[in-house]
Image (spheres, helix red, strand yellow):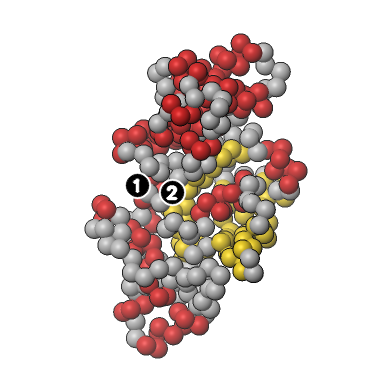
Amino acid sequence: MLLRINNLQVSFAIGLLSIQAVHTVSINFAKKSKTAIIGETGCGKSVLAAAVAGILPDNAGMQGQLTWENTPLSQQLLSDIRGKDLSLIPQNPLGSLNPVLTTGFQVSESVRRVNPCCDKELVYNQVLDLFRAAGFANPKTIYQSYPHQLSGGMAQRVLLAAAMASRPKLLIADEPTKGLDLETRNQNVLLLHQIFENSALLLITHDIEVAATCCMTAVMYAGEIVETGRSEELLTTPLHPYTLQLLNSHPARGLTPIPGSPPNMSSLPAGCRFAGRCSLRQKLNSSAKKICLIAHPALEPRQAYTAVRCWHA
């Protein structure tokens, strides 16, 4: 197993409050596996990605165990593999690039991180090759461009090129299609899978169609995983009511909004975190409904590759 995450918890200290952003998340990533994590904005997807990449802010507290190739993922090991075996494409590509440096120079730094002894001409040619692989027909022009001269989709491909330089064992892509038009989204997702065919991929997304390109999908709600399974099955016949309602809120499936709001993360309910918005619970008799409010359900395996956190699913 490439990466094991066991009972990961992340909270943020904000004044006198402790905001729990990720709660007892356990998930594994095999070599070359492709896994999507979906959920509403604020559910903890990006915090999970930041925790794995070791880039949480100073006011964050983290508990749990991360294991990399059967070795505990210490800060030292994380420093050794980050930017090499483990790469992150952040959510805001344009904001992640230095505005006063050319894109070519910035990708060159990624090449030098892996091959510090490369001479200048070799690095230059490698960067041009990376830009070509990332789908640029004019790599020399892109090399000399500054971030403000790029569109969001182009900036995303520059970061793909930078990540490619290290041939990572695990690539974390946080909302790689956010803000892109449909054609650019499809092109970039195809590139992502082609370029990193031999890498494990953790794809953070709110886009159901993008999640469907991965073999496995995990669904997060209010800081915890509520369902996991093969993408083909989970995205067509979901077990958890939240997954079903999330899918039905997609434009292609009727655009039915989920009523209500997620719970306050500084004061979480004792029972199921989705109980107040759950369409399934509304159909139950009063006796069956009670457990949803008083007891927190565990993430229970149901069949091969499938697990769900619900008392009634």
The quadrant of the image that shows the C terminus is bottom left
Q: CA distance from mark 1 to mark 2?
A: 10 Å
Q: Nearer the viewer, residue 7 or 126?
A: 126
Name the residue tied to disc 1: 209
Q: Amino acid at mark 2?
A: Thr
Q: Amino acid at mark 1?
A: Glu
Please provide percent x and percent y for residue 148. Answer: 46, 29
Q: Nearer the viewer, residue 141 or 225?
A: 141
Please provide percent x and percent y for residue 168. Answer: 59, 34
Looking at the image, which residue is at 47% across and 15% down? Answer: 140
Residue that sits furthest to the top in the current view: 121
Q: Which mark is residue 205?
A: 2
Whether residue 195 is visible, yes or no, is no
Discs 1, 2 touching: Cβ within 8 Å: no
Whether residue 208 is visible, yes or no, is yes
Q: Quadrant of residue 109?
A: top right
Looking at the image, which residue is at 33% across and 78% down? Answer: 282
**Label 2 crowd (10 A; few <14 / some 14-19 / many >=20):** many
Q: Secondary structure at mark 2?
A: loop
Indicate left or right for 132 with 279 as reference. right
Determine whether 163 is above or below 218 in the image. above
Determine whether 67 is above or below 83 in the image. below
Indicate left or right for 140 with 117 as reference. left
Determine whether 15 is above or below 88 in the image. below
